[in-house]
Amino acid sequence: MMLLHAILPLLFAFILADTSQLKLQQDIQKDVAKLQQSNSYFISDNTSETASLQSIFNDLQLFGMVSNLDLSKAKYSQHQQGPHQIQQWIFDQGQIKSITQLESIIALDTVVTQHYLENRPPSQHRITNNFVFRAYQVSTATEPAKLFYLTESEQGLLAYHLEEKQAHISYTSSKNGLNHLLPKYHAEVEAILKQSIK
């Protein structure tokens, strides 16, 4: 019993510390490693016809700088909205006004209808899969949504926005159900983040 009293506060402190952790740096490292290991993806970028892995790495340096900010001077808050855990760090001073981290755990279980070009009747397929998404938004004094980053734990980097620049990564072998879920999820997350802007 004495051992339980000694371990419980440590365990509780570890859980509390972990829930308020900005995970952007670990996601960037994971996503960069995945992109370097494979070339089975396409990059679309609204500012360039020749988007490359190097241009992504250059852009991600700015996200990396944000991930290294000292959060001890920020006011921290968190709340749950459906499957989304929303954490926010608000700064009273400096160019960056807030960093928002939104983590979603989604269990997809749906039936999709597949239509064919040939004269075949449509067929239905059941899709079940689990997804862990994380989205980040950085607001500054001049731009309420200056930076945006979206990743999925197994798939990797899906999209990022850097001011007016919008880049999207599509994978040739995407996680089962991702293409079905992503457009709706992306729109829902952007709406939630727009409400959370400080």
Image (cartoon, rainbow, N blue to C red):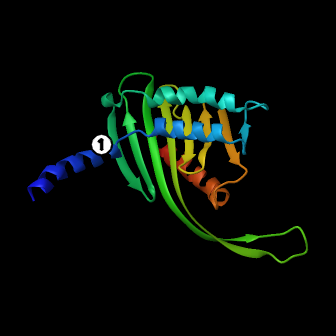
Q: State the residue in front, 41 or 143.
A: 41
Apparent side of residue 101 relative to residue 92 in the rendered image (left or right): right
Q: Is residue 63 left or right of residue 115?
A: left
In this view, the residue farthest toward the left is 2
Residue at horizontal 73 percent and vertical 71 percent from the top: 113
Residue 13 visible in the displayed image: yes
Residue at 10% of width from left, 59% of height from top?
Answer: 1
- How many numbered marks does the figure carry? 1
Q: Going 37% across and 34% down the picture, which residue do you hit?
A: 90
Residue 54, x across and y down, in percent? 68, 28
Give the residue number, with chain letter if any, for mark 1.
Answer: 17
Residue 24 location (% of width, % of height): 47, 37
Residue placed at 46% from the left, 50% from the top? 103
Instruction: Rate crowding at label 1 as few (under 14), some (14 to 19) or many (20 or more) other CA atoms within 10 Å.
Output: few
Residue type at mark 1? Ala
Q: Is residue 68 above or below residue 155?
A: above
Q: Quadrant of residue 178?
A: bottom right
Q: Residue furthest bottom?
A: 121
Q: Quadrant of residue 14?
A: top left
Residue 180 picture quarter = bottom right
Does residue 33 lie above or below 95 as drawn? below
Residue 177: % across, % down = 64, 61
Image quarter where the C terminus lies is top left
In this view of the protein, can residue 198 be seen by the observer?
A: no
> Where is residue 188 drawn, in percent x and y?
56, 53
Q: Secondary structure at mark 1?
A: helix
